[in-house]
Structures are given as structure tokens and as C-alpha cells.
Image (tube, grey):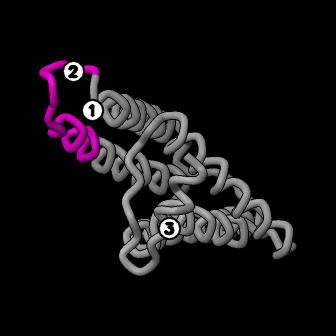
């Protein structure tokens, strides 16, 4: 297995590569009216923040001692956290597919439910209610108040609900 320093360097390097790619994609968003502070502002800000944080992780890794004494309990905690992290990434990928298939509200509710399960919550009724209410509130805020476009799901058309909440 890698030393903690090598692991952090791998994470930092990978994060830099992904965040620079995201920054490139963010700058490729075309401006509608010629202004820089339109559609690309938020993606550029988020990607730039990712680049900055990735460089900070890499610098931290470079300043770490080569070998750290880590207990077995800490190793188990790190492994559990890593598996949960990958679980959340997988739920993110599922969210993208669900977004296309069933639309924003249903995809958000299902994904929130799955994320809470991945993170270790076991009260299924409580997390289902939380996920559904949160998705409805997000629908109201983003589509109703902010006026974002709500694409219709290919399998389930909830445009009537979307209009009602907006």
C-alpha cells in the first residue's frame, strides 16, 4: 500500500487534473450577450476554487513526513470514509441518469435518499420524508423563484407538478 504522503500526492494530482479539465470546460461555455459574467460565471468560479483547493492538498502532501504512524482504528475509519466517498460519487452518476429519465424533482429526491443511505442513515421513513420535502423545496427555489429551466423527464413527465410548485 502507498504511504500517506503518496496517497495525498495522488489525490492532489488527480484533483488538479480533474479541476483544470473542469475549468477548461467552464471557459468553453459560450456567452450569449458577450459578457463574461453570464452563464459561465458559476462554473468558472467553482472550477477555479477546485483548482485552488487541489493545489493546497498537493502542497500539504509535499510537506507531510514520508511515514506517519497510523493506528489500525484510523486505517479502518479511512477505509470506511473512502468507500462512502465512492458511494456518493456513484450516487452522483445515478443522479445524472435519473435527471434525464425522470426529471429534476424525482431525481433529486431519489438521489438524496441514496446519499443519506450511503452516509449511514438507517431510518428509511425519516430520510424518505426529508428527501421528498427537500426536493420539493429545491424545485420551488430553483424553478419557481430563480426561474431555471426544468427539463421534462423522458420516462415520467411531471411538468404539471413543476408548474404547480413554480
Q: Residues within 10 Å of mark 1 (few under 14, many from 20)?
A: some
Location of residue 73 in the rendering, given as x and y in whole percent from the top left corner: 80, 66
The one nearer the camera, 158 or 31, is 158
Question: Which disc number belongs to residue 40?
Answer: 1
Local secondary structure at mark 1:
loop
Q: Was residue 35 drawn as part of the magenta stretch in this picture?
A: yes
Dot 1 or dot 3: first in sequence order is 1
User: Residue sitting at 85 percent across and 67 percent down?
Assistant: 126
Location of residue 11 in the rendering, given as x and y in whole percent from the top left corner: 43, 52
In the displayed structure, 164 sits above or below 112; it is: above
Q: Was residue 79 drawn as part of the magenta stretch in this picture?
A: no
In the image, taking residue 101 as reference, residue 2 lies left or right, namely right
The one nearer the camera, 16 or 150, is 150
Q: Can residue 2 be seen here?
A: no
Q: Spatial distance from mark 2 to mark 1, Cα to Cα?
A: 7 Å
Q: Which residue is mark 3?
A: 158
Q: Which residue is mark 2?
A: 36
**C-beta proximity under 8 Å, tags 2 and 1:** yes
User: Residue sitting at 37 percent across and 69 percent down?
Assistant: 100
Q: Report which quarter residue 101 is drawn in.
A: bottom left
Bounds of the magenta span? 20-37
User: Residue sitting at 56 percent across and 61 percent down?
Assistant: 161
In the displayed structure, 106 sits above or below 51; it is: below
Q: Spatial distance from mark 3 to mark 2, Cα to Cα?
A: 34 Å
User: Residue sitting at 80 percent across and 69 percent down?
Assistant: 121
Local secondary structure at mark 3:
loop
Q: Spatial distance from mark 1 to mark 3, Cα to Cα?
A: 28 Å
Q: Report which quarter residue 22 is drawn in.
A: top left
Amino acid at each position: 500500500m502507498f504511504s500517506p504522503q503518496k496517497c495525498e500526492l495522488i489525490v492532489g494530482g488527480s484533483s488538479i487534473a480533474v479541476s483544470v479539465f473542469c475549468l477548461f470546460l467552464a471557459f468553453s461555455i459560450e456567452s450569449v450577450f458577450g459578457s463574461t459574467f453570464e452563464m459561465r460565471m458559476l462554473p468558472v468560479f467553482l472550477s477555479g476554487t477546485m483548482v485552488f483547493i487541489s493545489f493546497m492538498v498537493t502542497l500539504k502532501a509535499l510537506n507531510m513526513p514520508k511515514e506517519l504512524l497510523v493506528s489500525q482504528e484510523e486505517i479502518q475509519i479511512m477505509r470506511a470514509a473512502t468507500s462512502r466517498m465512492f458511494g456518493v460519487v456513484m450516487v452522483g452518476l445515478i443522479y445524472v441518469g435519473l435527471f434525464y429519465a425522470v426529471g429534476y424533482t424525482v431525481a433529486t429526491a431519489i438521489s438524496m435518499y441514496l446519499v443519506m443511505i450511503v452516509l449511514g442513515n438507517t431510518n428509511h421513513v425519516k430520510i424518505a420524508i426529508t428527501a421528498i420535502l427537500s426536493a420539493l423545496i429545491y424545485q420551488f427555489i430553483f424553478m419557481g423563484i430563480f426561474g431555471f429551466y426544468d427539463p421534462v423527464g423522458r420516462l415520467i413527465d411531471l411538468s404539471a407538478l413543476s408548474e404547480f410548485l413554480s
